[in-house]
Structures are given as C-alpha cells and as structure tokens.
Image (spheres, grey):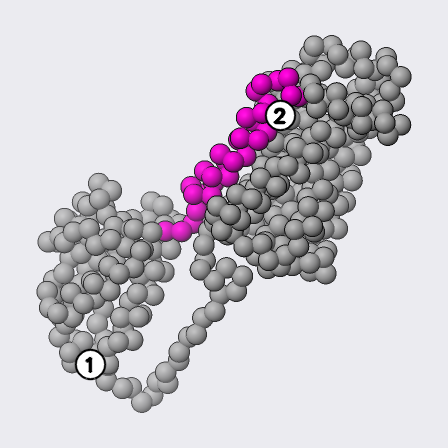
C-alpha cells in the first residue's frame, strides 16, 4: 500500500514537473512575494515631510526645529509664512505636518515658563498621522527635558523608563515576515492542490485513475503528498530569506516550527480538496480560492488587529486557521515560545485541521463515486 502511494506521488510530482508554469509559481513567487511584503508591507513611518511656520525666529525656536532633523522620522521640508501657505503645502502633498511655533516661544522658555506649539497633521492616512503624532510627542518631550522650567513644588517628577521586549527596535519586518509564511502556505498549497485535481477532471485523467487497482485513499494521498513536500520546501525558503536576508531572529525551535506547520498544511490541503470538489474548471478553482482565502487573511490579524474589529467579526475569526498559526509562528520567531505556551493555539488549529481535512476527504470521495 505504501509503495503504491509513493509510486502515485512520484508520478504526480513528474506530472507537476512537466508543467513549465508551476515552477515559478511554487518556488520563485514565494521569494518575490516575501521580498515585496518584507519591504513594502511595513508600519514603520519614516521621512515625514514637515513645513514650519516659525513666528518666533529665535535661537530657542531654531533649536526646537533642529530637534526633528537628526531623526529618521522627519524631514524639515521648508518654512512657510502663514496658515494658508502651510495648509496649501499639505493639500498638494508637499508636507504631512505643519508645525506652528508662536511668537512668544523663546521668551517663555527663557522665562522658565511652559510654551505651546501647534502641529497640524494630514489625517487622510490615519495610521501615518497617528504614528507621526506619537513621534512628535516623543521628540518634544526629549526637547522639553533639556529646558529648565521654574520648579513647581506641588508637582512631583515622574520619569518613564520604557523597555520593549521581543522586538526592541519595533521593526515591522520582524512582525510581518513570519506572517508571510502563513499567507504563502495557505495560498500556494490550497490553490495548487485545487488546480491540480481540477485539471485532472478537465482532461479526464482522474476517471482513468479511478478504474486502476489503486484504492481511493491511496489515490488521494498520492496526489496530495507532493504538495506537502512543496509546502515544507516553501517554509524553508521563507526561513532562509527571512533569517539571512531580512535578519529576522528565530528564537524558538525550528523543529517545532516545522512540526506545527505540518498541522497547518493539513488544513490548507483540506481547503484545496474542498475547493476541487465544488469547482469544474481551473478558473472556478482560482476564483473560489481567493473568495475563501481573503476573509481568512483579513480576520487572521495578519495586518489588522483582531481586537479592533467588531465583536461579531472577532468571534468569526476563531474559524480562521490562519489566526492560530500566526500566533504560533510569531511566538516561535520572536518570543522563543514552546508548546507549553502555544498549546492554546495548537489545540484549536489541530481541531480545525482534522475537521476541515476529514470533511473535504469525505466530499472528495463522494465526488469520485
């Protein structure tokens, strides 16, 4: 039985090898997507352009403006001569922030009194605006700490000492690259499984296989086994590129990563099988794959925090296997987590994997019948 399954798997692999379109899709596309997402899908905000309306024009106001220039977050683009001029720069996309320094800025600081500045931020991109405001607050607080104000006896001084664990530099790539692995696996293995089986239906070869001495279980496992190997191969590609090109740390066990990835691949193969049973052509299989995968990825927390979603969609996200695998893979990469920590995610992922795969197998067998 095992020999017949391996023989079937080898023939399926040779069949895949004959299709010149599959090699770039299976092996080159993951590298391209990883590179694009690694560099493009980032929440790091840098080089925000600032227009300055300095109504004070003193050494203090110039020192405050210079506090923004040594950082990688802001570029002081130009000085303006009024609100209308500054707002026009924002409207035309020539500045993201208009920094307004009042006329008494320097005098108040010299007198030991607090001074106020105004920042008008382009909020058309709320994420950029929010992060930019946080950066400005940090720079202003650092500048303020160097200015000696008159002591206020009724107030005690509070000093914040911050420490960020797991991702000290707050680099988006350390968060995004592990997530890319989950997305690539579900897209590539599910789609290739569905397309491979639907293609057999279109050309009529699957009926020829049914009449052979192969059992249906042997036929099914033989056809799926090459995609399991492809899935693990893609995991290796993502690991190598992520570690050696992007410098993403892997603090946990790589063996555990591959083992739990196998559970996840069981889910993706089940989805591919299910899609193949409801699709008659390869075009239908492609459309159905994206129709199923897109909600799963949106509800997974890959790019949008689940906690920010409405309660209904938060509950719905528990049906997405991507949600659990993202927590698992980011935990292994960044936190060095083991099974003792990850089991609350592993258990529901394994349950979904077995349920999806079993239902898909039963439906696939009825389709063959």
Tell whether 274 sits left or right of 327. right
Few, some or many residues within 10 Å of mark 2 (<14, 14–19, 20+): some
Magenta stretch contains residue 18? yes
Q: Quadrant of residue 236?
A: top right
Tell whether 269 sits left or right of 211. left
Check disc 1 and report the residue beneath it: 112
Q: Image point 45% across, 54% down: which residue?
A: 171
Residue range corresponding to the magenta coloring = 16-45
Report if residue 106 is visible in the image: yes
- Label 2 vs label 1: CA separation? 67 Å
Q: Main secondary structure of the magenta part?
A: helix
Q: Earlier in the sequence, mark 2 or mark 1?
A: 1
Q: Is residue 37 above or below residue 226?
A: below
Q: Are marks 2 and 1 in contact (CB under 8 Å)?
A: no
Check disc 2 and report the residue beneath it: 288
Q: Is residue 151 above or below residue 14?
A: below
Nearest the viewer among 203 and 295 is 203
């Amino acid at each position: 039985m095992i020999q017949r399954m391996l023989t079937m798997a080898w023939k399926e692999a040779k069949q895949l090898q004959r299709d010149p379109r599959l090699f770039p899709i299976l092996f080159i596309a993951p590298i391209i997507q990883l590179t694009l997402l690694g560099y493009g899908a980032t929440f790091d905000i840098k080089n925000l352009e600032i227009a300055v309306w300095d109504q004070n024009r003193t050494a203090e106001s110039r020192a405050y403006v210079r506090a923004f220039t040594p950082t990688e977050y802001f570029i002081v683009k130009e000085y303006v001569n009024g609100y209308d001029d500054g707002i026009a720069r924002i409207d035309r996309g020539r500045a993201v922030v208009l920094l307004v320094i009042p006329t008494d800025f320097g005098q108040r600081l010299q007198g030991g009194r607090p001074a106020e500045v105004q920042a008008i931020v382009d909020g058309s991109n709320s994420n950029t605006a929010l992060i930019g405001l946080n950066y400005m607050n940090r720079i202003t607080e650092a500048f303020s700490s160097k200015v000696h104000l008159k002591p206020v006896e009724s107030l005690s001084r509070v000093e914040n000492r911050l420490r960020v664990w797991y991702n000290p530099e707050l680099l988006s790539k350390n968060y995004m690259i592990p997530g890319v692995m989950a997305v690539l696996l579900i897209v590539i293995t599910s789609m290739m499984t569905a397309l491979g089986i639907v293609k057999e239906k279109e050309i009529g070869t699957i009926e020829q296989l049914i009449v052979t001495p192969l059992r249906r279980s042997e036929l099914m496992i033989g056809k799926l086994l090459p995609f399991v190997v492809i899935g693990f191969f893609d995991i290796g590609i993502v690991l190598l590129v992520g570690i050696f090109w992007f410098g993403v740390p892997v603090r946990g066990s790589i063996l555990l990563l591959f083992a739990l990835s196998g559970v996840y691949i069981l889910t993706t193969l089940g989805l591919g099988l299910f899609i193949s049973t409801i699709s008659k052509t390869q075009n239908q299989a492609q459309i159905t794959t994206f129709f199923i995968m897109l909600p799963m990825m949106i509800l997974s927390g890959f790019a949008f925090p689940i906690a920010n979603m409405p309660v209904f969609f938060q509950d719905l996200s528990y049906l997405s296997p991507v949600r659990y695998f993202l927590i698992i893979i980011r935990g292994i990469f960044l936190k060095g987590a083991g099974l003792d920590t990850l089991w609350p995610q592993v258990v529901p992922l394994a349950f979904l994997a077995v349920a999806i795969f079993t239902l898909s197998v039963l439906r696939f067998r009825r389709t063959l019948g």
